[in-house]
């Protein structure tokens, strides 16, 4: 834990504070105000991201600090998208989105090193930005899918069947939006690997973790196709395992000494 | 029929879950061992079974053919698996045995500046290169004790390309131009540039610093004194003089490779940096067939050369003297199939999971308005 006494740090804390206040307001059922605060949180996130971009002079997606900053930026547009186009924007969902925004920014504010880095030769490719960007978007969708799945598991007894079916369906919808993004991320990464290192697949720990994450969702889709909503709790468990694999891909494979490979940039 | 479908669907589940488990296992054992593992014979059986299962399911499940998105996704999977098998080391060996086609899956080629090379070394070998005054390049392998053993041209782990790669020039580009870092005892510091003969700098009234001479490859001997050696090699240095306010002058050499060497100034710490973080490497290559240049290209990281069924990638270089470049060479066998599979899978997933629901949505919306009228 370390507090960042920099303009960058200040902007991160400002964004986090907005997300947190919005979340608390949601709990207090002040939904309109919460929506406004959430929006201003997004504005702060844009300024924060823009400042970083200007500061390091390349799109900030290079290391864990910048990648999590990206996650904190895209959460608001994705909330809006889900509410508008998927009709998944009930108060509980919005509240957890705000919390997700706060949580993903937490390590950028207090844990990850913000020291700007230059792009090493292998990262200087036009595939770099789209590869990371689609992954970040898909991760947020999968996180939202897992949140819905947790709602489904926790609410087994409490809520009406209607709501439970809603949560199960919402999980599926989120996975359906996120899965093509996840596929695209994997394939762009593979393509880039071919150009940069000569191989489209290197059996590197990070690659294998990302393949495993993708396969969890392939498994989810096939399982749900086979059984529909008959074993809804297994569907949910599957979606949650997918998110766990994603978190391990993102964090463990980068931070742990266990998986030393070409991807340990951060 | 229904039973068969259920059985195939269950097998698909098992195949998918098994691959998930194996991927995680592979992540724990490291890239090198997991590459060997995923290319082993039992896994080859698994990959073939996977592909066959997909092909069978195309015949079995009508929807897999009828629904375009599903067809593209699963065809994409088949293409990727087939391409992967075709391009694997064993795939190359098998074609060599059956069809007599001589091609190598991957390896490393080291080319000296001004010379041509066609020997590709297996990338599992810990190799070293030596060059004699007649420009004959020999390849050695380190044994388990770190002793070099000569590798003959007949060694099966050396592959001879049917053409030669010639290295015209090799260059490294750095992020920063050369500069001199000066630190004072009180914590003040300066970054001085450009480093040119006769350039002079004020160190905030504490002193002034003048560049007397710069060297790319500093050498010193009894007769000539200090000089810049034009022969290959690298030893960047700068000769400076510091003049203090009381008029005393102090001269010294600052070496990039030996910081803190020779006649150190007491008041200032000096560091000469010409080689900051590498921005990019470039190799100017020519492909030579029967003594004629057939292709010329400058390659850098992310920009390979393609010729004769192989890709050549900038991989490494001589970090001491900059005399040679190291390229990794990979066969393109099966590559098009894999990439076609990628494309099919992406288009299929985007169509099936994004576009189809959107199109369906607009169709029902239209129907509703039609009914409303
Ligand atoms: C042995 C391997 C596989 C078999 C036998 C198989 C078979 C099937 C079958 C029968 C369906 C249902 C089609 C329908 O009636 O709607 C299906 C759906 C699907 N498959 Fe596969 N599949 C396999 C591997 C994969 C893989 C590796 C992927 C990776 C992208 C994949 C992606 C999908 C998707 C996205 C669906 C649609 C699910 C949905 O709409 O909910 N499949 N598969």
Image (cartoon, helix red, strand yellow):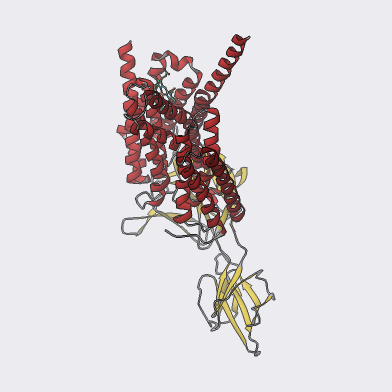
Q: How many marks?
A: 0
- Give above or below for B168 relative to A199: below
Q: Quadrant of the C terminus of chain B?
A: top right
| Residue A55 position within the rendered picture, expressed as x and y whole percent measured from the top left | 60, 56
| Quarter, ligand 1 | top left
B107 on left or right of B293: left
Residue name at image x 44 percent, y 17 percent: B64
Compared across the picture, whether B81 is left or right of B350 comes to left
Quarter residue B363 falls in: top right
Front-most of B94 and B16? Answer: B16
**Residue at x 55% of width, y 83% of height:** B267
Residue B228 percent location from the top left of the image: 61, 72
**Residue, x 41% and y 36% (percent of image)?**
A147
Q: Give the quadrant of the N terminus of chain B.
A: top left
Q: Is residue B85 above or below residue A115?
A: above
B320 shown above or below B169: below
* Residue in the picture at 51% in, 74% down: B259
Q: Is residue A141 in sight in this rendering?
A: no
Q: Is residue B320 visible?
A: yes
User: Is B189 on the left or on the right of B74, as rendered?
Assistant: right
Could you say which is closer to the camera, residue B230 or residue A199? A199
Q: Position of residue B124 (x, y in %)?
A: 38, 47
């Amino acid at each position: 834990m370390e507090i960042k006494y920099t303009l960058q740090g200040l902007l991160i804390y400002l964004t986090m504070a907005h997300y947190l206040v919005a979340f608390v307001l949601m709990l207090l059922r002040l939904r309109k105000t919460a929506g406004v605060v959430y929006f201003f949180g997004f504005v702060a996130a844009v300024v924060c991201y823009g400042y970083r971009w200007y500061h390091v002079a390349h799109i900030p997606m290079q290391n864990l600090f910048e990648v999590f900053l990206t996650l904190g930026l895209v959460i608001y547009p994705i909330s809006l998208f889900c509410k508008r186009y998927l009709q998944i924007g009930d108060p509980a969902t919005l509240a957890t989105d705000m919390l997700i925004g706060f949580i993903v920014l937490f390590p950028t504010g207090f844990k990850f090193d913000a020291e700007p880095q230059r792009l090493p030769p292998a990262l200087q490719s036009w595939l770099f930005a789209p590869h990371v960007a689609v992954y970040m978007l898909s991760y947020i969708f999968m996180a939202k899918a897992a949140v819905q799945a947790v709602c489904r598991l926790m609410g087994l007894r409490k809520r009406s069947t209607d709501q439970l079916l809603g949560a199960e369906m919402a999980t599926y919808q989120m996975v359906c939006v996120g899965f093509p993004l996840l596929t695209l991320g994997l394939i762009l990464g593979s393509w880039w690997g071919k150009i940069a290192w000569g191989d489209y697949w290197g059996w590197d720990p990070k690659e294998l973790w990302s393949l495993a994450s993708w396969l969890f969702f392939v498994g989810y889709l096939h399982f749900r196709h086979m059984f529909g909503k008959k074993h809804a709790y297994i569907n949910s468990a599957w979606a949650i395992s997918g998110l766990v694999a994603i978190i391990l891909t993102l964090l463990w494979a980068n931070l742990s000494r266990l998986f030393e490979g070409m991807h340990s940039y951060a | 029929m229904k039973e068969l479908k259920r059985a195939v669907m269950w097998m698909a589940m098992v195949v998918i879950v098994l691959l998930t488990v194996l991927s995680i296992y592979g992540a724990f054992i490291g890239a090198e061992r997991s590459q060997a593992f995923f290319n082993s014979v039992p896994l080859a059986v698994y990959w073939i079974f996977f592909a066959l299962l997909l092909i069978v399911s195309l015949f079995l499940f009508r929807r897999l053919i009828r629904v375009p998105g599903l067809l593209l996704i699963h065809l994409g999977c088949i293409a990727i698996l087939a391409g992967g098998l075709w391009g694997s080391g064993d795939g190359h060996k098998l074609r060599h045995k059956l069809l007599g086609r001589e091609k190598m899956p991957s390896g490393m080629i080291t080319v000296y500046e001004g010379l041509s090379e066609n020997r590709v070394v297996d990338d599992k070998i810990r190799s070293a290169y030596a060059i004699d005054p007649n420009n004959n390049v020999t390849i050695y392998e380190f044994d388990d004790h770190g002793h070099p053993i000569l590798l003959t041209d007949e060694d099966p782990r050396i592959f001879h390309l049917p053409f030669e790669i010639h290295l015209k020039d090799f260059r490294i580009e750095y992020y920063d131009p050369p500069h001199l870092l000066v630190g004072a005892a009180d914590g003040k510091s300066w970054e001085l540039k450009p480093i040119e003969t006769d350039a002079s700098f004020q160190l905030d009234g504490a002193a002034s610093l003048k560049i007397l001479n710069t060297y790319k490859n500093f050498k010193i001997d009894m007769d000539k004194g200090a000089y810049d050696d034009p022969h290959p090699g690298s030893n960047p240095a700068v000769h400076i003089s510091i003049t203090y306010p009381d008029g005393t002058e102090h001269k010294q050499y600052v070496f990039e490779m030996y910081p803190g060497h020779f006649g150190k100034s007491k008041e200032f710490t000096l560091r000469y940096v010409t080689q900051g973080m590498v921005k990019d490497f470039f190799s100017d290559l020519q492909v030579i067939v029967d003594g004629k240049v057939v292709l010329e290209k400058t390659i850098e990281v992310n920009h390979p050369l393609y010729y004769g069924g192989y890709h050549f990638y900038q991989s490494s270089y001589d970090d001491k003297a900059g005399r040679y470049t190291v390229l990794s060479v990979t066969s393109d066998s099966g590559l098009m199939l894999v990439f076609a599979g990628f494309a099919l899978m992406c288009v299929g997933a985007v169509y099936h999971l994004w576009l189809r629901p959107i199109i369906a949505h607009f169709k029902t919306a239209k129907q509703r308005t039609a009914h409303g009228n």
